[in-house]
Amino acid sequence: MAEKRLKVSASPHIFARQNLKFVMYAVILALMPALFGSIYFYGLRALYLVILSVAAAVVAEAVCQWAYKRPITITDGSAIITGILLAYNLPPGVPYWMPVVGSVFAIVVAKQFFGGLGYNFINPALAGRAFLMASWPVAMTHDWLPPAGGTISGLDGITRATPLNLIKAADVDPSVIERLTSLEGIRALFFGNVGGCLGETSALLLLIGGIALLILKIIDYRITLSYLLTVVVLSLILPIKGHPPYNILFQLFSGGLFLGAFFMATDMVTTPVTKRGRWIFGIGCGIFTMLIRTFGGYPEGVSYSILFMNVWTPFIDRYTMGRRFGTR
Amino acid sequence: MPITFIGGVHPKEAKLTSGSPIEVLPPPKTVYIPLSQHTGKPARLLVSKGDEVKLGQKIGEAQGFISANIHATVSGKVKSIGRFPHPVLGDGIAVEIENDGEDTWAFEITEHDYEKLTPQEIIDLVKEAGIVGLGGAAFPSHVKLSPPKEKPIEILILNGCECEPYLTCDHRVMLEFPEEVVKGGEIIARVVGAKRRIIAIEDNKPDAIALLKKKAADFEVIPVKTKYPEGAEKQLIYALTRREVPSGGLPMDVGCLVHNVGTAKAIYQAVRYRKPLIERVITVTGENIKEPKNLLVRIGTPAIEAINHCGGYIKPPEKLIFGGPMMGIAQYTDQVPVIKGTSGILVPAEGEIPEPGPCIRCGRCVDVCPMGLHPCIIVDYVENLKFDDAKRLGILDCIECGCCGYVCPVRRQLVHNLKFGKAEVWRKKD
Ligand code: SF4
Ligand code: SF4
């Protein structure tokens, strides 16, 4: 009866605007303010590190997919994000080969080995960073650069340390800590005039991108909110030396917390899908971050705590499904 | 606090035809009337090839309680009985009737007093008229009017939400036939003894809300939030009463009964005029229809007849959907007939079907599922043929609303797999 068969597909027949590419490129855009910040603080070297990292990630993804005979999906933006995040987690003074090695590890071992996007169970960028940390610990913990315009303590970045290093170091003059946690010190942390990893120094610039993602509902608020709130609560309980006045703000704005809470703990693939699970994930990240910062061997704990929670994600999902409609 | 449920999505409303008055589509030359247009057993065929039939004559008899009568929707001659395209089943047995153009009724359509009828007499009239739910599920109405004694109905909800994008037939029915809707509602309320009577309308239809507030003195007209699927039975009951229909249960388990406003009108006509369900209002719409309209069409009219009445296609169609874009069913031909449960014909501009990708575990499907399910995990199980696990996670509670598929950024085939998984779980049960 019908001359030409029409196309048949399952419902629904319309879709939300946010497809995979939309989500991924929105995250990339949201990471851009921080990139401009680090170019300002550390010069063009920061840009080159990021470009190398992204290029290595994209090439590694293409080669892997070709080798595994999977569809080549390098335009979906996920490898670009991995590259950017890996570079953001490096000290700005590292040699140029380092982001390349890190990105290749991240894509080949942490992502494609497990089956590619959607099947990896830990955040590839953080896995890459952990790999670099284990293989070249000296570079990863000493290649800091002072930001343009100098720093408040006069020490971080210059004597090769970040504010979190300084707070923890036993031999630091109490007056330095006082300066770091003074209003002026907090302001520096907020705007980014501090030593630190390439993309993490400016809390403000990360916040701009992060809040945009929250407003557009690209990332879920539950993890970010519970992560940050946990840090706030614990910073009231866990003291830093001499109970400086702006403890909470110091903990919030220093290190990689904003980068972690907005951009890495919210990675969709490696975090719980259940609503309650996401709260638990964020709280877990917050607890471990503060424990490492306060008692651990490393000055900063953001990336390890997220990696640690990534591992627990399948368990969290399993036990947090909650009540279905009509099963009271 | 707005009156609504938990979860859901906000697709573009795209109600192109809210302002278009219902037009009567001239009965077509030929109608194809399937014997199965409802939930339950198909009707038993009462006519044979070559028979002369009159308008409103019963040509299919309900088999058993959960089934519905089928009537001739034109007068003329039975040309054939055979397999024809069916909008839900793909194809199915239908009666092909050649219209003689006379519209000779099988009986006289006059007004009857119904005030003195007993509830059972009314239920019988509704059954005789072959009324089914016109909102889409096509559940036989007489069944819903006969709840068991131990499940008394306290609240009757007339559903005028029309939460599916594009569709406007219920909206127009409320605007153009408010008295019939209200009187139908009163009949239903009397039959089931509902003390509280509600008409629920999404707040994107302020004109219908205002009009019914004026016309329906015995009803509470309650605006509900415009959100999909606000008009889904369980979600609407929860929004209005905070009662949750238990998993696997029915609205009557929480003392509620929900009827679509169009069904209320049809019930009124069945009781007042003894008029069988021979026609319904549909919305013919979409970016590929020249003049989208609301039409009153005879059951069994091929889709193309309704489309041609709306100026036809703008360009050759790629896709044609019966129902709305969220739950509607894609058709392979435009010859498929309108049946009782057809609320609209949607012809979108594009027909491309997005390529599904691997799940990125973003959890969006979980966030929007109005039944509190975890579609991504359930579908993982279905894809691995682990139906027991899918059942444990509540796959049978899925109402197939499509919210999960709508938000999924990788366009995973969630609803398709959920339907498949449900069918498998049911099959194992038997
Ligand atoms: S799982 Fe079922 S009920 Fe839940 S959103 Fe998907 S289709 Fe709707
Ligand atoms: S919305 Fe799609 S991609 Fe996201 S978790 Fe659900 S199925 Fe996976």
Image: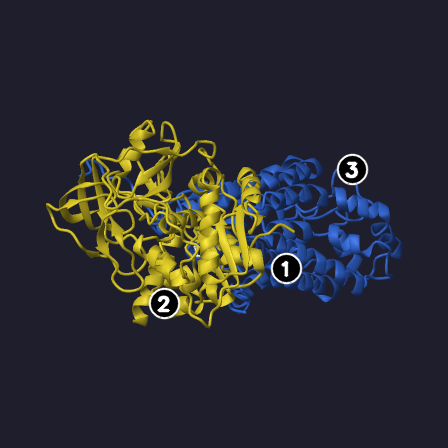
Chain colours: A blue, B yellow
Q: Does residue B192 sit above or below A32 in this rendering?
A: below
Callout 1: CB less than 8 Å from ligand 2: no
The verdict on a common chain for dots 2 and 3 is: no
Could you say which quadrant of the image residue B66 lies in? bottom left
Image point (51%, 65%), residue name: B255
Instruction: Please state the quadrant of the image where ligand 1 appears.
Output: bottom left
The amino acid at mark 2 is: Lys
The amino acid at mark 3 is: Gly
| Numbered badge on residue A282 | 1
Q: In the shown orientation, is residue B359 left or right of residue A26?
A: left
Q: Estimate the x, y position of residue A119 in percent, counting from the top left.
A: 45, 57
Per the image, the residue denoted by label 2 is B386
Counting residues from the N terminus, which is met first, the one under dot 1 or under dot 3?
3
Per the image, the residue denoted by label 3 is A149
The Cα–Cα distance between marks 2 and 3, rounded to whole angstroms, is 61 Å
Q: Does residue A211 sit above or below B427 in this rendering?
A: above
